[in-house]
């Protein structure tokens, strides 16, 4: 199970990276392919790739559930079937809405930002489902949640710190750029006043 979860997370990250690369190509611009059609094509590729393994791995389980439903008979079978269809419909709507929102957000932010938000999304889902369904969380789960939150907070802190430095650097460039210039005529980089001549000395008299 751990291997399946790890591969699932890797595929999700690779999907986001592929989406960004596709958006950067000439044929992947938002004016050519909107988010809805992009998500539809990705889901279509996923169905074509996984339909055979899904049928091979779950056909017998699905047939056994159907046999059990018909064995019960009467109103109980109808109630069981209606509940299954309703939960499947709700799950499909939730999954589609989440993927559309993920595609919409990823189009407008970087892959790293999207991965950080996805990390917090997983933590939120684990905590909410534990509270709603009353499932007890183990120490290992608490440790994983704490590490995820700590990593996200650390990322936000360093991101804000970097943006503050960039803002300060731009302000200094804007302030000093009008009176200072870079002199590279003698093979050395040094700041000089713009009022000074940048021409070599031996060319001034010519």
Image (cartoon, rainbow, N blue to C red):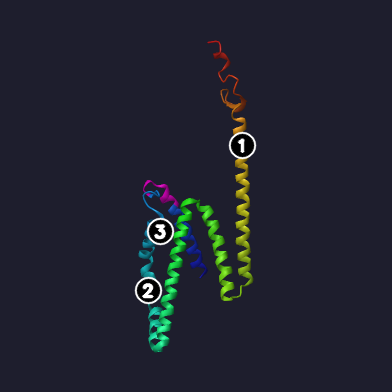
> Which residue is identified by label 3?
39
Q: Looking at the rendering, which quadrant does residue 182 occupy?
A: top right
Residue 45 left/right relative to 158 = left
* CA distance separating discs 1 and 3: 41 Å
Decide: is 180 above or below 120: above
Whether pointer 3 and pointer 2 mark residues with C-beta atoms closer than 8 Å, the reply is no
In magenta stretch: residue 34: no
Residue 157 left/right relative to 89 = right
> Which residue is identified by label 1?
171
Element assignment for label 2: helix
Residue 156 left/right relative to 22 = right
Among the two numbered marks 2 and 1 on one chain, the one whose residue lies closer to the N terminus: 2
Whether pointer 1 and pointer 3 mark residues with C-beta atoms closer than 8 Å, the reply is no
Whether pointer 2 and pointer 1 mark residues with C-beta atoms closer than 8 Å, the reply is no
**Which residue lies at the image location 48% right of the left edge and 64% below the top edge?**
8
Q: Position of residue 78 (x, y in %)?
A: 40, 84
> What span is in magenta?
20-27
Among the two numbered marks 3 and 2 on one chain, the one whose residue lies closer to the N terminus: 3
Residue 136 left/right relative to 79 = right
Q: Magenta-highlighted stretch: main secondary structure?
A: helix
Judging depth in this view, the residue of 178 and 114 nearest the camera is 178
Count neighbours of disc 1 (C-alpha within 10 A) and say few if under 14, some if 14 to 19, many if 20 or more.
few
Element assignment for label 3: helix
Element assignment for label 1: helix
User: Which residue sits furthest top?
Assistant: 205
> Which residue is identified by label 2?
56
Which mark lies nearer to you, 2 or 1? 1
């Amino acid at each position: 199970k751990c291997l399946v979860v790890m591969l699932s997370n890797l595929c999700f990250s690779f999907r986001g990276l592929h989406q960004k690369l596709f958006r950067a190509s000439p044929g992947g611009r938002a004016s050519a392919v909107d988010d809805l059609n992009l998500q539809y094509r990705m889901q279509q590729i996923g169905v074509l790739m996984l339909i055979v393994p899904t049928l091979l791995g779950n056909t017998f389980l699905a047939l056994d559930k159907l046999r059990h439903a018909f064995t019960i008979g009467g109103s109980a079978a109808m109630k069981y079937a209606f509940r299954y269809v309703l939960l499947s419909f709700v799950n499909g709507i939730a999954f589609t809405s989440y993927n559309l929102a993920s595609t919409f957000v990823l189009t407008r932010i970087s892959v790293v930002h999207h991965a950080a938000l996805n990390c917090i999304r997983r933590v939120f889902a684990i905590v909410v489902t534990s509270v709603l369904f009353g499932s007890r969380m183990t120490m290992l789960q608490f440790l994983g949640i704490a590490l995820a939150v700590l990593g996200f907070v650390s990322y936000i802190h360093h991101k804000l710190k970097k943006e503050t430095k960039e803002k300060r650097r731009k302000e200094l460039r804007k302030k000093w750029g009008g009176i200072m210039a870079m002199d590279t005529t003698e093979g050395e980089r040094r700041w000089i006043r713009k009022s000074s001549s940048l021409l070599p000395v031996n060319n001034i008299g010519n």
